[in-house]
Image: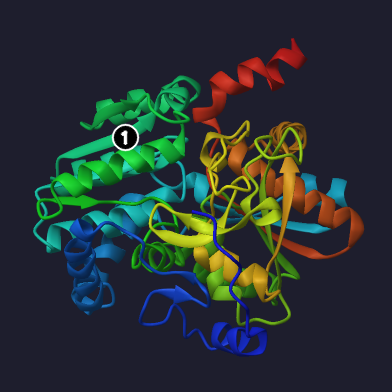
Amino acid sequence: MRTQPVPLDTPTLLANVMSDVYPDARGRFGPFGGRYVPETLVPALDRLQAGVDRYLHDSDFLAELHSELDTWVGRPTPLTHARGLSQRWGAQVWLKREDLTHTGAHKINNSVGQVLLARKLGAKRVIAETGAGQHGVATAAACARLGMPCTVYMGEIDMERQAPNVGRMKLLGATVVPVTSGDKTLRASVDEALRDWVSDPNGTYYCLGSAVGPHPYPYIVRELQSVIGREAREQMLKMTGSLPDIAVACVGGGSNAIGLFHPLVKDRGVKLLGLEAGGIGTGLGENAASLAYGTPGVLQGTYSLLLQDENGQIRETQSVSAGLDYPGVGPEHALLMSIGRVKYEAVNDDDALAALAECCAVEGILPAIESSHALAGAKRFAHANRGTKILIGLSGRGDKDMPTLQRTVLKGLA
């Protein structure tokens, strides 16, 4: 649904952001966010909000969560000085290694927290959507660990290009449901998960994987993923004696980026840069860069920036990365861009794949294609700002991307 832009009181909104008083009681990040859902889901969201208020910052809940993060997920994740990239780029490059978590990406931080919450709320089963498959794998693993049945919805196109993760989900005991409707990617998977949830809002818990959707999901995901930025901030101070000049992360729906950015937002001396999927061009349907090219509207329960035509019809997206291939973005990112606290740019497919190959060659690290968008954007920044200290959120590892890499990067090396 296409809507008119809401006027921004930028000074007030910036002050609220710097004071960490957002979202408001209605789930709004300035003009963005809120709830746009069928009436049948309102009681479920109210119960979820009550559960968040009761448990999310409760000492007993946090003790159990941190125990799982420390002893099962593998936190804290390391901060690695990328010596090869630093030398090549003329900057000091540091990588926050979410690729080293159990299941191989940042998604596990959120899944463990939400499945614990689902158990507290008395849910009988957990459902999830997935694009690149990492959220599906993380949720399947968390459900296996905590004894909850799990169903994952995944677009037919994504199942083909992320085949290794489909197998992993099944081995972890999840039922994987192919989505053959719509664009057969992440957006269609969210639609199917929402339909499932509407059919059983009492017994089913929807574990949403990114910082999108109706309130309180963007808040829940931010709170659970902020462990990334808290750790990275502390590690940078300990290892280098100061904060980075800039923190860089890839942005699809935005969970990895908001997890890195949120604990650094109040550090005025730290620039924040998000990199979206620029795909193959700047035209509608050629990319998945909602912040760069989107307009305000409502999608899947929230008001944010979307890739839509003049009639408000959501357009299909294009990206070599399944995890960034989504036509919207979390409402908090829309706010942070609108008030100028975070800068967002697009990185095209070719530059992301080139950055992936470079990281493999000089660091011995195979990053996810999603993360490679952040690497490409950081490289661009480094070349224009020599000698700076750059913190990059390496959101996941690239094992899952081998079918795509066989057709792209490796084909060029043959």
- Give the left or right position of residue 41, taking residue 15 as reference: left
What residue sits 18% from the left and 57% below the top?
Answer: 40
What residue sits 74% from the left and 44% below the top?
Answer: 347
- In the rendered image, residue 324, in percent from the top left (x then y), is placed at 56, 42
The residue that mark 1 highlights is 153
**Residue 50 sits in quarter:** bottom left
At label 1, the amino acid type is: Tyr
Dot 1 lies on which element? strand
- Give the left or right position of residue 376, taking residue 16 as reference: right
In the image, 387 versus 372, the foreground residue is 372
Which quarter of the figure is the C terminus placed in?
top right
Residue situated furthest top in the rendering: 414
- Give the left or right position of residue 324, taking residue 106 as reference: right
In the figure, 347 relative to 244: above or below?
A: above
What residue sits 10% from the left and 51% below the top?
Answer: 203
Residue 148 visible in image: yes
Q: What colouring method underlies this structural image?
A: rainbow
- In the rendered image, residue 375, in percent from the top left (x then y), is placed at 71, 47
- In the rendered image, residue 343, in percent from the top left (x then y), is placed at 72, 65
In the figure, 302 relative to 87: above or below?
A: below
- In the rendered image, residue 311, in percent from the top left (x then y), is placed at 58, 47
